């Protein structure tokens, strides 16, 4: 039987109990399936499960767990080289703190328009660490469609590969924009990594969401909002 109050909502303590039971069940199934197998490094397996229990099954929790369990294992390989799970987590922490200093927090909408590379993953993990809303642009959008999405969704900040910025979409003059990839190796993310603190960010009160924009046709692209979860 499910208990609710007079307004039809469940008390916070029951919601928290359900959340903990759900996360414990997920940790059990990870061990049972062999994803987290007890062995000589059982302390790392336990640490990884703890990360999932505290962060939840989000992209932030998944990469935190991997950074604990397999810190030196390759996480991302792109044209610039290989990043381990520890290196990716460290850069995501710096990026999250730099974005937090610029006002990004729980529910803040941040646009992300990138090809598949390490910067994309690090940005998504960083935003999940903050509980922000990640607005994922389809790479096939025209400059006019990009402008329309920005006008409609009103992101507080835009992270985009230089090739998309070179198409010169009509963006608000006060919208902070950082390049995530350029052919000459220059990246605005490097600036954010440099100024961002390496400290781990606190777990957000609410998990972030991801809005995936459609490619669209002649109208403004639309996209459903979904929780930023790995499962």
Image (tube, rainbow, N blue to C red):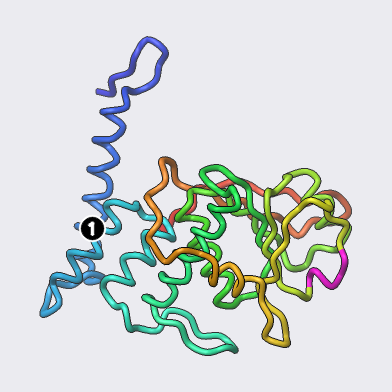
Q: Is residue 134 above or below residue 94?
A: above
Q: Residue furthest left?
A: 40
Which residue appears at 27% of the width and 37% of the height? 18
Pinpoint residue 106: horizontal percent, then vertical percent. Answer: 51, 43
Q: Is residue 94 above or below residue 84?
A: above
Instruction: Give the percent coordinates (x, y) of residue 190.
Output: 59, 75
> Which SS does the magenta portion mostly show?
loop
Quadrant position of residue 71 = bottom left
Which residue is pictured at 45% across the width and 82% down the height?
83
- Please rate how many residues cluster around mark 1, counting C-alpha atoms within 10 Å: few if below 14, some from 14 to 19, many from 20: some
Q: In this orientation, which residue lies closer to the viewer: 105 or 46?
A: 105
Q: Is residue 163 left or right of residue 83?
A: right
Q: Quadrant of the C terminus?
A: bottom left
The number of callouts visible is 1
- Queried whether the magenta region covers residue 166, the answer comes back as yes
Q: Residue at x 54, y 49 (%)?
A: 132
Between 226 and 166, the one nearer to me in the picture: 166
Q: Where does the image place residue 154, in percent across and percent down from the top left? A: 73, 45
Q: Quadrant of residue 200?
A: bottom left
Q: Position of residue 63 (x, y in %)?
A: 39, 67
SS of the residue under disc 1: helix
Q: Quadrant of the N terminus?
A: top left
Of residue 223 and residue 58, the one placed in the foreground of this image is: 58
Mark 1 lies on residue: 50
Taking the image as shown, residue 206 lies to the left or right of residue 102, namely: left
- The residue range painted magenta reads 164-168
């Amino acid at each position: 039987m499910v208990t609710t109050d007079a307004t039809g909502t469940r008390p916070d303590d029951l919601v928290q109990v359900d959340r903990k039971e759900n996360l414990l069940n997920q940790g059990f199934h990870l061990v049972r399936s062999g994803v987290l197998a007890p062995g000589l490094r059982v302390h790392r397996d336990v640490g990884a499960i703890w990360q999932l229990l505290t962060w939840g099954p989000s992209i932030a929790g998944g990469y935190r767990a991997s950074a604990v369990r397999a810190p030196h294992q390759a996480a991302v390989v792109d044209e610039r080289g290989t990043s381990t799970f520890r290196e990716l987590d460290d850069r995501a922490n710096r990026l999250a703190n730099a974005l937090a200093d610029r006002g990004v927090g729980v529910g803040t909408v941040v646009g992300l328009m990138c090809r598949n590379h390490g910067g994309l993953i690090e940005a998504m993990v960083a935003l999940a660490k903050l509980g922000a809303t990640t607005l994922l642009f389809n790479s096939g959008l025209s400059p006019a469609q990009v402008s329309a999405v920005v006008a409609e969704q009103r992101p507080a900040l835009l992270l985009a590969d230089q090739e998309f910025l070179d198409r010169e979409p009509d963006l608000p003059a006060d919208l902070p924009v950082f390049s995530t990839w350029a052919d000459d190796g220059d990246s605005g993310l490097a600036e954010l990594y440099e100024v961002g603190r390496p400290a781990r960010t606190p777990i957000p009160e609410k998990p972030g969401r991801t809005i995936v924009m459609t490619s669209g046709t002649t109208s403004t692209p639309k996209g459903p909002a979904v929780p930023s979860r790995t499962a």
